[in-house]
Image (tube, rainbow, N blue to C red):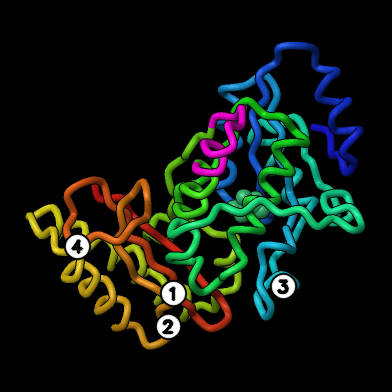
């Protein structure tokens, strides 16, 4: 696997593979875990060339968020990415992605970016869509792989690709969980042992709502209360949001009549975790 920091070298390296090669792309912010590796493995099984990027994107972090402390470990990531089938690891620095004076952003407007994470992180998705668009321009992938854990990010990116007629297929991959149910996240390393224990409530509360929905309960207010009440039993849990929305549009719903997304964001100390399930 080649590790490349420079855009021109990356493009030349991809070109050297020859024409008509299928390029799979897995954009990440590094500190890779099994969730990322499942994306890389899938990309590698479906494409001729698999490019993984590691870039902790400053524009998607708000003031006071964890940009500085976001975990980073290139050597470990390189080993893991290569083991999962990556051919190229693109590891640019901020100046490479955002040239001096850069002032162009790509923003998906509307409810889809205002709800859920968008309400407590107002500039977050603008940063995500800008960097993903930039990375797509650099890598020119045929397929790009994203985890369902960041369900809102996935919906926003799909919308950007559709709205801008971008020639890339977005492949959604299922959430990977620890055996006890905690959704894998690079941020999980920030949890102390007690927070880690209590963080299990996210998947447990979501599953409780799913079980109730399976017995015929479709009232969103009731299902949301089940999730919030469950999470609030944990003294260290500080809810950012609990919501159930239309899966495709992220519009508010009162009853579940079509696929719905039940999503939560909860702080444990300095660590903010997200999780979700699809009710369909
Ligand atoms: O999901 C992430 O890790 C990031 O938001 C992404 C898509 C790599 C953009 O920085």
Is the residue 3 above or below the residue 231 in the image?
Answer: above
Task: Give the CA separation, mark 2 to mark 3.
Answer: 20 Å
Q: Residue at x 71, y 33 (%)?
A: 51
Is the residue 176 above or below the residue 103 in the image?
Answer: above
Task: Give the CA separation, mark 2 to mark 4.
Answer: 25 Å
Q: Quadrant of residue 240?
A: bottom left
Q: Which is more N-terminal, label 3 or label 2?
A: 3
At mark 4, the secondary structure is loop
**261 horizontally vs 158: left or right:** left
At mark 2, the secondary structure is strand
Instruction: Tell me the mark number nearer the camera, choosing from 2 and 4.
Output: 4
Q: Which residues are magenta?
A: 159-169
Task: Give the CA separation, mark 1 to mark 4.
Answer: 23 Å
**171 horizontally vs 208: left or right:** right
Tell me the residue that label 1 is attached to: 266
x and y percent of residue 85 in the render?
66, 31
């Amino acid at each position: 696997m080649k590790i490349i920091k420079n855009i021109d070298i990356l493009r030349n390296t991809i070109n050297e593979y020859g024409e008509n090669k299928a390029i799979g792309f897995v954009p990440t912010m590094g500190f890779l875990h099994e969730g990322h590796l499942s994306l890389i493995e899938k990309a590698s099984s479906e494409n001729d060339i698999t490019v993984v990027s590691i870039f902790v994107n400053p524009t998607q972090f708000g003031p006071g968020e964890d940009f500085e402390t976001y975990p980073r470990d290139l050597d470990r990531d390189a080993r893991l990415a290569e083991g999962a089938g990556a051919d190229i690891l693109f590891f640019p620095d901020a100046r490479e992605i955002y040239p001096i004076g850069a002032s162009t952003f790509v923003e998906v407007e509307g409810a889809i970016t205002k709800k859920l994470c968008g309400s407590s992180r107002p500039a977050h998705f603008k940063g995500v869509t800008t960097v993903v668009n930039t990375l797509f321009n650099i890598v020119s992938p045929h397929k790009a792989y994203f985890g369902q854990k960041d369900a809102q990010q996935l919906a926003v990116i799909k919308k950007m690709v559709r709205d801008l007629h971008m020639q890339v297929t977005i492949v959604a991959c299922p959430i990977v969980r620890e055996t006890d149910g905690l959704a894998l996240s690079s941020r999980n390393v920030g949890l102390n042992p007690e927070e880690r224990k209590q963080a299990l409530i996210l998947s447990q509360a979501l599953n409780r709502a799913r079980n109730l929905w399976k017995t015929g309960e479709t009232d969103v207010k009731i299902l949301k209360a089940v999730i919030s009440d469950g999470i609030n039993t944990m003294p260290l849990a500080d809810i950012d949001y609990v919501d159930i929305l239309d899966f495709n549009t992220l519009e508010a719903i009162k009853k579940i009549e079509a696929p719905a997304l039940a999503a939560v964001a909860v702080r444990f100390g300095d660590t903010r975790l997200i999780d979700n399930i699809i009710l369909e």
